[in-house]
Image (cartoon, rainbow, N blue to C red):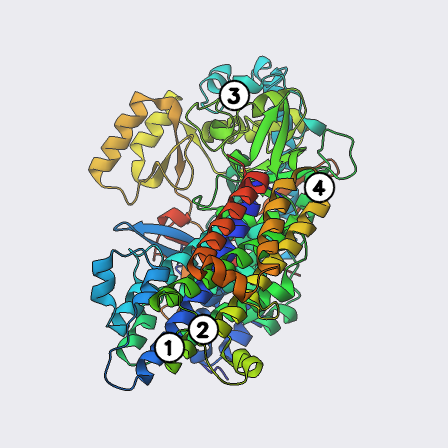
Amino acid sequence: MLSRIADSLFWMARYMERTDGMLRMLKINLITALDRSGQANFNWQPVLKIFTSLPPEEVERLSLNSDEVLRYMIFNKENENSIRSIVGKARENTRGAQDHVTKEVWESINEFYHKLNDPGLEKAIARGEQIVMLSGLINQYLHFTGVAEVTMPREQGWNYLNLGKFIERGVITADILDIKFSNISNDLANPSDVPYWRNLLLSLNCYELYLKRYQGSLDGQNVADLAILNPQFPRSLAYCLFRLERTVQHLSDEYPENSDPVKKIIGRLRAKVEFADMESISGVGLHTFLTEMKLNFYQFSNALGRTYFAYN
Amino acid sequence: MAKNDLFQHYHAAPEFWDEMRLPDGAVRTHYEAVVRELSQLPADDLKRKEELAKQLFMNQGITFTVYFENEGIERIFPFDIIPRIIVESEWLHIEEGIKQRLKALNLFLKDIYNEQQIVKDGIVPASLIVTCPHFTREVFGIPVIHDIYVHIAGIDLIRDADGTYYVLEDNLRTPSGVSYMLENREITKRIFPNMLADNSVKKVSDYPLILGKILRSLAPRPVGQPVVALLTPGIFNSAYYEHTFLARYMGIELVEGRDLVVDDHKVYMKTTRGKRQVDVIYRRVDDDFLDPLVFRPDSALGVPGLMSAYRRGNVALVNAVGNGVADDKAIYAYVPDMIKYYLNEEPILQNVPTYRMEDIEARAHVFANMEKMVVKRTNESGGYGMVMGNKASPEELDGAKAAILADPRSFIAQPIIKLSTVPCLIDGKLQPRHVDLRPYALCGPQGIEIVPGGLTRVALREGSLVVNSSQGGGSKDTWVVG
């Protein structure tokens, strides 16, 4: 496969995964904002910090106005990280690699793009149909993942898609945990209020799993345990790293000469999570642990670039 | 009993050949079934089908981008849902004519880049060849595989007032539009499935298979699975959709110049597993941009060193480099002579009468009849550099004359042909519009194959005779029935 194509597929998958992360965050937080008990206003700061590069005063200005946040994060064309922009980038990458994704995958992304660019869609905010709109967009994303799953051949291209997808997912999970926990000073024993944890668990899409596994009580220790260490939870760092390592293995089976650096990095990274427990993580400090994880993801991504994508 | 009044308001102008109606207003036999079925559709259904067709093009990404106030707007190439129908007997005539023409043109290109016998025998003037901007000295004497220069030709045909087919243009470089021929048919399958089946329309879908087979047969290396790539200028090219379409349906790599590298006179792709040698390149990049070391040094679309690999026979390029000398509009006038010279045959398809502006008598005749003429630049295409005598203002005509006098070699004139009309659905009503026809001929070691049909381009503006998409043209599905 052409290096350029591998690179495009990798980034397409990253952008699509980010789209999913953002849409989910927006929807859950919007619902939380409605659910509040009345006194304190719901604050969008954590979401804005994770998914935009706005200066603090802008974050401050937007943080109390849900509709403005939606407009900025979904539709704003000047915002390079808006859903509209990143789906546009995913589409550009797919367009350049069109002969390596199935026609169905291309059509799904293309439809998504046109849906976002339909001037009628933004009006849903003014009509008070924000949640319906977000659900519609999430369904469009699910359509894409389903179509990719069912139609894409399990060749090289599939592996590059998976690399992009699970790196991005891991980074998002680490980001969400980092920001949410720094709000409560990384104190795992902090008995923060129930809505706070519920919001976090819903954002990670693991509320139900959490309830089943931990039978009730919401506390930081368990939340971090689930999101970092649980190998059955598809958004946990452990799961993302497991998938990444397996994908790297597939690639290096086909191309053993050159994949050493990539294999080493992912091996190290995985060991770090696999042999950790909450005690050891608390030992180094949650914030330090997550920051290191993010840095390692970044290094891994760079190594992939040097090994497989270098074409310039 | 008709369920709509579609056909009641269809008035074809008598001075043109209407492909659906006879001069007395009766429907031609080969259109009868379609007219019958269309009349049975409630008016709303047609509107819905038109909408559906638009949606299908949009969702498949068959669009081009128009830039307006710094914002890219995606448009679809207008598609008229009413099929254009050609009877098989006429098609066979067209097919024979194109095959004959292409055979002669291939022989001409071989001759002109080697012995130049046709010039020595005084059939084509040497001055015309050397002044042609597309005559490419850099490829002189380079042998090409199977002596095929034109593997893919899009020869434009039109019909005059009496229904005769004429060749308007030979497109022998990188003719585009074939994906529209194929996609238009796919859309018809979705909007008029029964009508299509009832008319036993000949299929066009084999095109990518035939082309793929030809491309693989051109590999210079004796390998079982040659590596074939389609070289595209990239996603900003207006034909990019077509490039992805063809690569996908031939199962070949779609590459850009930056994906290729030349080493020791061989061409390689840069892949995730290192370099991989490429045997055949179906290039959709113009000659000028192919190799910055030989042609335009500022080209970022090409591959430095590509021509050196080509010269050594390590890579096949499709179409060959330098074909522009054969589809130059002034040299076009000599194609009938080429057919006689190389094949000793009479041309099956006629040229549109063409006046070369270097010829003083012809020029005087044209200047005296400017309002009946269309003046064209010899090295332009896409409807650019064209002056229609009946539409131009006196100032424009004077401007054209001055330009001709300044550089007569670069112009030809042709009488304005009364292009035939076909029914189109415009604002919910059937109206006659002018069309041309571009069949796509494929030339391989086994001979020439043409899938039955082609791209019908239609001038959607009322009265317009210019069908180019850059000038407000659209397209139609084209049926060969019989």
- Up the image or down, A181 lies above or below B276; here it is below
Image depth: mark 3 or mark 4 in front:
4
Asked whether A90 or B204 is in front, the reply is A90
Callout 4–callout 1 Cβ contact below 8 Å: no
Residue A117: numbered disc: none
* Number of other residues with Cα within 10 Å of mark 2, as a class: few under 14, some 14 to 19, many 20 or more: some
Image depth: mark 3 or mark 2 in front:
2
Q: Which residue is mark 4?
A: A256
Report helix, strand or loop for mark 3: loop
- Up the image or down, B404 lies above or below A74; here it is above
Report helix, strand or loop for mark 1: loop
Callout 3–callout 4 Cβ contact below 8 Å: no
Q: Is residue A225 visible?
A: yes
Q: Which residue is mark 3?
A: B136
Q: Chain of mark 4?
A: A
| Identity, as a three-letter code, of the amino acid under mark 2 | Gly
Q: Which residue is mark 2?
A: A220
Q: Position of residue A286 (x, y in %)?
A: 45, 61
Compute the Cα span from label 3 to label 2: 74 Å
First reached walking from the N terminus: tag 4 or tag 2: 2
Quadrant location, the C terminus of chain B = bottom right
* Number of other residues with Cα within 10 Å of mark 3, as a class: few under 14, some 14 to 19, many 20 or more: some
Please state if A308 lies on the left or on the right of B131 as rendered: right
